[in-house]
Amino acid sequence: MKTFSPGEDTFIKLCLFILTSVAAAFALFWLRPVMIPFILALFFSLMLTPLIDAQKKYLKFPKILALITTLALGILILVVFWLVITSSISQIAQNVAQYQQKIELFLNKIIAMIHLEKFGINIKQLTAPFLKNMGENAGVMIRTVINAILGIFSQGFLVLIFLVFLLLGKAKSAKTTNRDWLEGERRIKRYIGTKFLTSASTGVLVGIILHILQVDMATLFGLFAFILNFIPSIGSIIATLLPLPVVLASPDLSVTSATLAIVIPGTIQFIIGNILEPQVIGDLLDLHPISVLMALIFWGMIWGIVGMFLAVPLTVIMQIIFSRIELTAPIAGLLAGRLEKD
């Protein structure tokens, strides 16, 4: 049997690791219809387990009753989300003509301010086709959004099935003593719990501010701020910019109110996301910001928008696994931003 030198052995292991990683990424992409609901159910089970344990400990509920009440609460929250989104979409569909008039008034203001006719630019002629087809375009957009929401909720049924079996299985099985699993579970629970509280605070504050400033669909934008805050880095930016078209299409808003509708939510996102949240989480994740950004891109390519939501927890799990294997330990250090050599 041929023997290899230490250098050759390391090189072979590295090549095998790269091939295995590529194969695993392809498998995750190909199996995403099953893997996404399962991983979502796994993370939801981590979130709901403390609530179930609290009902058993303080309310003396049986395991099955605690599970049923927790699932009922989760379904109720999803129904509320569904009602808010569908009512907002219905509001958009009913007010397409009004938004068309508001956008036309806004464009007329711009034309009056900068006098583009002097340069031979006819803005009305350029924007006429867009305004004429706005109703049709809005209908296409609404149908697209509804189909996307229905797709999410159709996956939600599979998530619910996985979640029930995971919670039932966890209730019957003995507690694990595996150190790696316990560390990963502790870090992910802490991250999800902190993210939920900060995202909820952000969503409530943004919704209240926009409602006070009389911005249309303030509740929907607050809900989007809550949801998008789970996407690292870019989620808060998207949530801040989402109300911009509605604000610009609302001539009833003064310049001051329109400015505040963008500046105040952006400030809230910055303070909570960049000052308060890092203080609470601290070094719990042990991930470099560049690693988080790369994870966001990688998981977004494989699993789309759901992958972007799960990018940080999945990368934390990968880092824990890599840190326990000698060959991949440097990769774990790289994810944490530790480049020094021993």
Image (cartoon, rainbow, N blue to C red):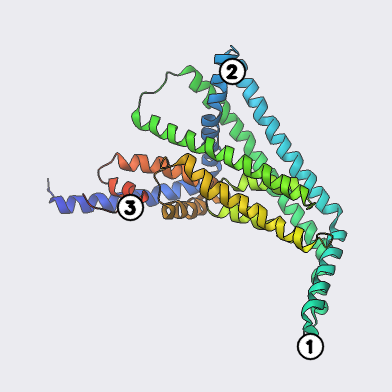
Mark 2 element type: helix
- Cβ–Cβ below 8 Å for labels 3 and 1? no
The residue located at (70%, 30%) in the rendering is 76
Residue 335 percent location from the top left of the image = 37, 50
Look at the image and tell me whether residue 231 can be seen: no
195 and 63: which is toward the camera: 195
Residue lying at 49% horizontally and 47% vertically, measured from the top left: 311
Q: Position of residue 119 (x, y in %)?
A: 76, 88
Number of the front mark, 3 or 1: 1
Q: Residue at x 29, y 39 (%)?
A: 324
**How far is the residue under mark 3 from the one under mark 2?**
46 Å
Quadrant where the N terminus is found in the figure: top left
For marks 3 and 1 on the same chain, the one whose residue lies earlier in the sequence:
3
Instruction: Specify whether 189 is left or right of 324.
Output: right
Most foreground residue, 175 or 257: 257
The secondary element bearing badge 3 is classed as helix
Image x and y of residue 288, in percent: 40, 51
The amino acid on which the numbered mark 2 sits, given as a three-letter code, is Gln
Q: Nearer the viewer, mark 2 or mark 1?
A: 1
Whole-angstrom CA distance, mark 3 to mark 1, is: 61 Å
Residue 339 vs residue 171, the one in the foreground: 339
Residue 129, x across and y down, in percent: 81, 73
What label does residue 18 carry, if any? 3
Q: Which mark is residue 118?
A: 1
Q: Are marks 3 and 2 in contact (CB under 8 Å)?
A: no
Pointer 2 residue? 55
Quarter where residue 34 is shown: top right
Q: CA distance from mark 2 to mark 1?
A: 72 Å
Question: In terms of sequence position, does the residue under pointer 2 or pointer 1 come before the other?
Answer: 2
Dot 3: few (<14), some (14–19), or many (≥20) neighbours within 10 Å?
Answer: few
Please state which amino acid type lies under the numbered disc 3: Ile
